Image (cartoon, rainbow, N blue to C red):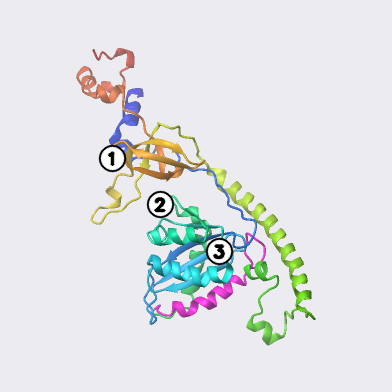
Amino acid sequence: IWTTLLWCRECTDCASRKTSGPAPRAPLLPSVTSRPYERIALDILGPLPETPQKNRYILVVGDYFSKWTEAFSLPNQEAKTVAKVLTEEWICRYGAPRSIHTDQGRNFESHLFSELCRLLNMHKSRTSPYRPQSDGLIERFNRTLLSMLSLFVDANQQDWDALLPFVMMAYRSSVHASTGFTPYRVLFGHEIVLPVDVLLNTGVQEKFQTTNEYVSRMEGILSTVCEAVKKHQIRASEGQKQNFDVKVNFQYYSEGELVWVKNEARKRGVCPKLQRRYRGPYRVLEKLSDVLYRIQSEESGSEMVVHFNRIKPYVVPSFLEKNYVKLMYQCDFEGLFHVRPEQINIS
């Protein structure tokens, strides 16, 4: 039994296809900001059915602190289109953020987008490959946005861009679970006045005699709201981490260690069900953070950055693989299950 288990564990063909034990799961690393528009996240949603205005994509921009989110309809997802809309519709309106987080889409990784970030002194971070959870704020909002749009679009689904402003108003006027406030109130210090409020003459705002009086009053309100949001976000982050880390299966990899990398790529004409799940071996070059590693292919020499959840240890074939043929000559197939290491002569 010992011989068989060791042979299967060291077999490169078996290791590239099969999984063993619980799936790797790194602990959650929450991201908490201290003020509105300090850090934003971007993503492209689509392609969607083409509308009469020739729109097929949605650029989603979200603020990590207030959860204020904008959705802009786009005819394409080219880098110049994305950069133009981000600059004119977000930065010119709300100011330049200190940090931008995106996935590894070609539009966000382009030279044009990099130059935009450099000119405006914005730090650019990105998710690791095949790890959309690293952009959880926007990925979760995308699911909510699609659900809201699906309830109102026509049968031909070609009016979604006309509905965007209305569903976004509904989202920004709803209480967010992570902050305890609506995104509108976090930014403006009061709730949005909806058409139903005008109809019923409710939600009457406090009246001010001068601009200075209004500014002073808003400063106090916004300061109170921001402090409450910080405390609520910390409690929410702690709760999310506690729930997520229940199933953590984590270990550290050392520099020089060999690993397998989960193969997430899909090729046209190749059935994923018959595809090997891992490729490698790769050698760990550097530990970038608690969950990110820079690795290098032993075969091609190419380097990449991967998340812990996509790698597993590589067991270097040693005793059994090198001497498998000699073992088969010394004992029959049934005897291989009962042979002891000290009984094997490989001289």
Q: Are circles 3 and 2 on residues that touch, CB within 8 Å?
A: no
- Relative to 131, residue 61 above or below: below
Q: Residues within 10 Å of mark 3 (few under 14, many from 20)?
A: many
Q: Quadrant of the C terminus?
A: top left
- Residue occupying image coordinates x 52% and y 77%: 165
Looking at the picture, which amino acid does disc 2 mark? Answer: Tyr
Which mark lies nearer to you, 3 or 2?
3
Residue 73 image position (x, y, % from top left): 44, 74
Q: Which residue is mark 2?
A: 130
- Residue 91 visible? The answer is yes
User: Residue 300 — which label?
Assistant: 1
Q: Are circles 2 and 1 on residues that touch, CB within 8 Å?
A: no
Q: Quadrant of the N terminus?
A: top left
Which element type, helix, strand or loop, lies under badge 3?
A: loop
Q: Residues within 10 Å of mark 1 (few under 14, many from 20)?
A: few
Instruction: Please give the range of residues in magenta.
Output: 157-182
Front-lying residue, 296 or 173:
296
